[in-house]
Image (cartoon, rainbow, N blue to C red):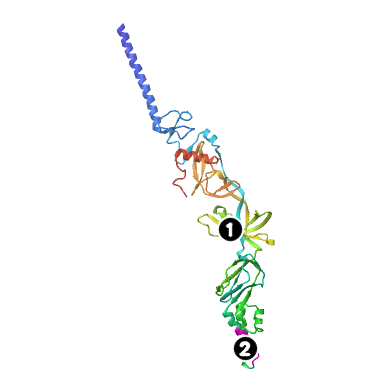
Amino acid sequence: MMKKIQNYCMVLIVILAFIGCNSKNKENHSGHKMTAEAIFYSCSMDPEIKQDKPGKCPICHMTLVPVKKSDESPNEIKLSKQQIRLGNISTQAISETRNSLEQNYTGILTINQDKVNTLSARAMGRIEKLYFKTIGEYVNKNQPVYSLYSEDIAIAKQDYFTAYKQLAMPGDFGKNAQNMLKAAKQKLLFFGLTNAQIESIKTKAEVSPYTIFYSTSSGYISEIIATEGSYMMEGSAVIKLANLNTLWLETQVNVNYAKNVHLGQNAKITFPDFPDKTINAAVSFINPEINPDTRLLLIRLEIPNQGLQLKPGMQAFAKLTQSNLKGLFIPIDAVIREEKSSYIWVEKTPGVFENVMVETGAEINGLIEIKSDLDSSKKVVVTGAYAVDSEYKFRKGSDPMEGMKM
C-alpha cells in the first residue's frame, strides 16, 4: 500500500513540473516577442526617458510604454492626450477665404528728382563767382547764379561788337556786317546769354570776358557742384534746384508682400510729425530689381506738398489696402519659419502629427497665406505648433526639415 502511494506522488510531481515548465515557456516567449517589436521603452509624460526594458519612469514614476517601429515615421510624432492638453495644441480644417490685405510701410520723404533742374555751364571757362553758396537757399527765376570767365564767349561777344560797328559802313561791308551780326547773336544765344545781355554789348566801350548767368527756374538749392575758381567744361553741372511742391516717399517692401502692390495703387499717408495730417497718394514706381541681401523691394509714392509743410528727410507711414484677396490663410504662429524653409504641423491621425513644407505669401491681420496645395481632409495645427515642433526636436534630436531645405 505504501509503495502505491509513493508511485502516485511521483507521477503527480512530474505532471506539475511539466505544467509549470510549459507555462513558463509561454510567458518567456510572449516577452521575447514584445521586446523584438519594441525599439525602446519611454514615458508618455517624459519622452526624454528611454530604456531598453520595462520599468518605471525615474521622474514621474509612471509605467514606461513600448515604442514600436510602426508607431512613427521619420517626420511624425505621437503625443499623448495630456501632452496635447498641456501644450494647448488645437487643429482646424482650412479652406479658401476672402480677406482684405492691409499693409503698412515706413519710409522717408525725399526730393522728387523729376522736379530737379540742373543749371550747367554753357561754355568752357572758370567760375569767377557763385552768388549762392548754401544748400537749401531759395533761388528765384532770373536771379544771378554764377559769373563765368570764358574765352569762347569773349570771342563771340567781340564778333558781335565788331559786326555791329560795321553796319554803318557803305557797300558790301555793311551788307556783310548784317550777316555777321546775325550769326554772332545766334552763337551768344547758344552760350546762354539773354537778349538784354546781347543788346548791352552794343553800348559798352569794350567787351568783357566775364559773363553773369541767371537762373532759368525757381527752386531750393539741393546741390552745389561747382566752386569759385574751378574750371568747367561745356555742359558741366554748376548747381541743382529742387521744386518741393511734390516729394517722393520711398520705402522697402518684403518680396512676399510686393506681389500684392501695383502701380497706381492708392495709399493713405500719415506723418509722425503731423499726427492730424493724412494725404492720399498713389504708387508711382516699383523697382524691378530685388535686393539679393535683404530680399526687399523699393517702392515709391508721389506726395503732394501744398504749403511746403513737409520736408525731405521726414518719416512717413504708407497704408496700402487690397480688398477681396482670396486664398488659404492660417494663423501666423501656425507656421514654423526656418532660415530657408517654412513648414506646418498637420494631424495625420488622432494624436499623430506630421510636418509639411509650405510656401507662404502675404500676412493679413495675424494670418498668413499658404500658397502650397494642402490635403483638405487633414487638419492643421493652429495653436501649439511650436510646442509640437519643440517636442519633435527634443525627442528625435533633429530638424523636421533637415535634408529638405528649399
What residue is shown at x 34% (from left), y 19% (from top)? 18
Give the quadrant of residue 70: top left
The residue at which mark 1 appears reads as 299
Determine the secondary structure under disc 1.
Answer: strand
User: Residue 100, relative to residue 231: is it above or below?
Assistant: above
User: Residue 82, relative to residue 334: is it above or below?
Assistant: above
- Pick the residue in front: 366 or 175: 175
Determine the secondary structure under disc 2.
Answer: helix
- Pick the residue in front: 86 or 78: 86
Tell me which segment is drawn in magenta: 158-169
Q: Residues within 10 Å of mark 1 (few under 14, many from 20)?
A: many
Q: Residue 199 placed where, x, y %? A: 66, 82
Which amino acid type corresponds to the residue marked 2 in the rendered image?
Ala
Q: Nearer the viewer, mark 1 or mark 2?
A: 2
- Say whether residue 360 is visible: yes
Disc marking residue 121 = none
Membership of 165 in magenta stretch: yes
Location of the N terminus by quadrant is: top left
Q: Residue 272 placed where, x, y %? A: 65, 53
- Pick the residue in front: 279 or 198: 198
Q: Residue 157 placed where, x, y %? A: 61, 82
User: Residue 258, relative to residue 222: is it above or below?
Assistant: above
The residue at which mark 2 appears reads as 177
Q: Residue 168 placed where, x, y %? A: 65, 90
- Pick the residue in front: 216 or 138: 138
Precedes in sequence: disc 1 or disc 2 = 2
User: Residue 254, relative to residue 139: is it above or below?
Assistant: above
Which amino acid type corresponds to the residue marked 1 in the rendered image?
Ile
